[in-house]
Amino acid sequence: MSSSNASNERPAWVAHHFDTAGQQVSSAKLGMWLFLATEALMFSGLFLAYFLIRKLHPDMVLVASEELNKAYGGVNTVVLIFSSFTMALGVRAAQVGNQKSLERNLMITIACAFIFMGVKYIEYSAKIHHGLLPWNFFDMEKAAHHSAALASFEYTPMFFGIYFTMTGLHGLHVVIGIGVLTWILIRARRREFTPDNYVAVENVGLYWHIVDLVWIFLFPLLYLVK
Amino acid sequence: MSNQTHDSVEPSYLVAKKGLLSWLITVDHKRIGLMYLVATLFFFMVAGLLAILLRTELFTPGQDFMSAQTYNQVFTLHGAIMVFLFIIPSVPAAMGNFLLPLMLGARDVAFPKLNLLSFYIYCIAAVMLVLTLVMGSLDTGWTFYTPYSSTTGTAVIMATLGVFIAGFSSILTGLNFVVTVHKMRAPGVTWNRMPLMIWAIYATALIQVLATPILAITLMLLCIERVLSIGIFDPALGGDPVLFQHFFWFYSHPAVYIMVLPGFGIVSELITVHSRKHIFGYRAIALSSVAIAVISFLVWGHHMFVSGQSELAGVVFSFITFAVAVPTAIKVLSWVATLYGGSIRYTTPMWYAMIFLWTFTVGGLTGLYLSTLSTDVHLHDTYFVVAHFHYVMVGGTVIAFLGGLFHWFPKMFGRMYNERAGAISALLVFIGFNVTFGTQFFLGHQGMPRRYYAYLPEYEYLHQISTVGSWVLAAGLFLVLFTLLAGLKFGKHAPANPWGGVSLEWHTATPPIEHNFHHIPHVESGPYDFPEIDWDSAKH
């Protein structure tokens, strides 16, 4: 539209309001990084709340965090880190135009996300079974039956409140991740991505890495730290 | 510009596509800007009428036509709608959307579909906030302080979810604008050749992106608190209610600058264009916007001087708050210096810019009383605070918004308004505004607390002056509306550049064509290099 020499080489996937493909790609990347900043800031609020609870009730947090299953948490950590790796391989495959590898890696990543949610389901079920829930649903009788030490603290439900809030919001991000990864997989199968035009894969990859990154902080803080 | 014959053939963005649907699914930033403008003006009117109800109830010391509970609900809705549905989106989303790509010489914002999505997210939020009216209303004040907000029986969840969703709209708009400014500038539009309006919008967008997520998590925690009860904000359940205030003001103080920075941008444009003089201290004004954006994240504690934070924290926050005065004063003094020796034209936009200089300066200087620890203890939660933030929000943002509306109205709609009616509206607004809120400084200093529906008889005299002032202010604002609507219907056709502006939005047709420019402009000089400026004699 503007400069006549560029319009000849202009690929069809470049939107009307951009001058060049490079401008469109770099805009998309900058937009994604800004979005990731908002994600990090949003979770930072929850981390602050977590630290406040630790500061106000250190003894309670120590005992209550023993209730979280380190093995399940550890497995999920490995699963997510592995899925970040396959995601990175998928982006690389898109970059070099390896269609088969791109689809395979995306599928593995999605499968890992499902495994993560499955393990989370088992963990949540155990907590619900023992009545270890936030204030409104906390069952003192079941909790005392499960562990006398837990029941001896006045504010035990706070820990499970912040546990469910943090892991719940993170889990929601994993579910959204499954959605956008599936969308990218469908587009990949339609052969929409080329070595010039794969910024959507890259951006979803960035999103998936931050989901992973948040978990890498959540796991030690909730499950491991004494 | 070059092939004028071709220009006149292509239809303007208003008529390029026809039918209601072409508006509802448009990705044209100008149309989206207009839709925002209509929506925000509608909510400005709704919340303004609520304010008139409040002032009228306060005409006498006792109860007139509102119970205490109704009064609480009305002032809450007034505040929540004004802040989240009017002031925050008004200048950035309505005017910014229209102007940003035009001023940068771009065809559209970086993400046009996202832009339309943010508008609809805003609409959903608006519907939710209005729905609280039929769901038992809301009586927490727009600040949603805990533990009251986590225990009251009113529609807190609906309201906070509404604000939460409005936040997403704000984040997406901010993100879009930051990327647009970085990536979509036309050739030759360097950072130092951007109009100051763009600098202000850019600084605003940065705050929108970096502060709003904190509001989102705060309101989400409040909702979870009500549904599951973590106890984090409730001392009875082991939490700390002051944490909510930290969370809330960490967003809401920067949000004050989301509201006022775009107003600064507008005033920079109005003053320089209508006094035919190059802006004084371009870089100082541009960078002071960014400086204000940065400092705004470090001053939230000044809302909590009496909330039991440590003495040291109080001193530090007080000091940093004083620091905000420096970049703000740089702006005000630069505007005054721009006026000095200029060929001032007393157009309606210029009248509003002049009013802004007066009212905003009063608002800014009274902020210094409130950031001083000892005086704040006396003035905290009184009408002094009410008057202060209305001088900044109305006297700053709204006055600038009105000036900008008159300034860019010809560009938006291709029609002129009646100058005399515009000038009379400015006079009415100026008188009404100062009578309404000027008296409240005295009320507050004498000890009248905010948010009370009844008061002691000794305050009656000042309250009555204030209420009469609010009626004058309302009359002035309705005159603005009628002037613009009449201009739309009967106004003369506007030339492409009625004010002789140099920035890029004046270099295209009026109203602009759908893709803004026939040829992407190539810029070789600054946005305020007016042709009549005699640079040689200016050097002496």
Image (spheres, coloured by chain):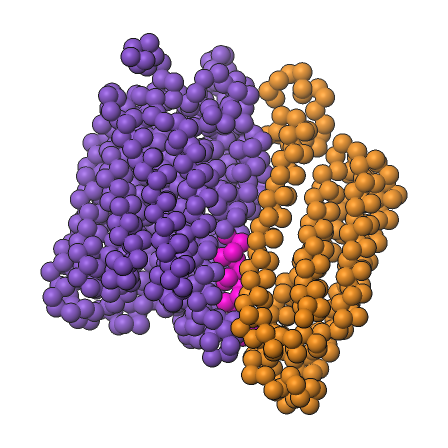
Chain colours: A orange, B purple
**Viewport quadrant of the C terminus of chain B:** top left
Instruction: In the rendered view, tell whether residue B234 sits above or below residue B185.
Output: below
The stretch drawn in magenta includes residue B218: yes
Q: Taking B392 as reference, is B174 left or right? A: right
Residue B532 visible here? no
Left or right of A18? Residue B119 is left
| Residue A24 x/y as whole percent | 65, 32
Q: Residue furthest top?
A: B536
Rendered residue at 26%/42% (across/down) = B361
- Residue A31: quarter of image: top right
Magenta stretch prevailing secondary structure: helix
Q: Residue at x 69, y 90 (%)?
A: A145
Q: Is residue B459 above or below residue B8?
A: below
Residue B452 appearing in the image: yes
The correct choice, above or below, for A213 with respect to B200 in the image is below
At which x and y percent is residue B118?
53, 47
Q: Is residue B154 above or below residue A15?
A: below
Q: Could you say which is closer to the camera, residue B361 or residue B187?
A: B361
Q: In the rendered structure, does residue B216 fall within the stretch colored magenta? A: yes
Residue range highlighted in magenta: B212-230
Give residue A115's position: percent from left, percent from top: 80, 63
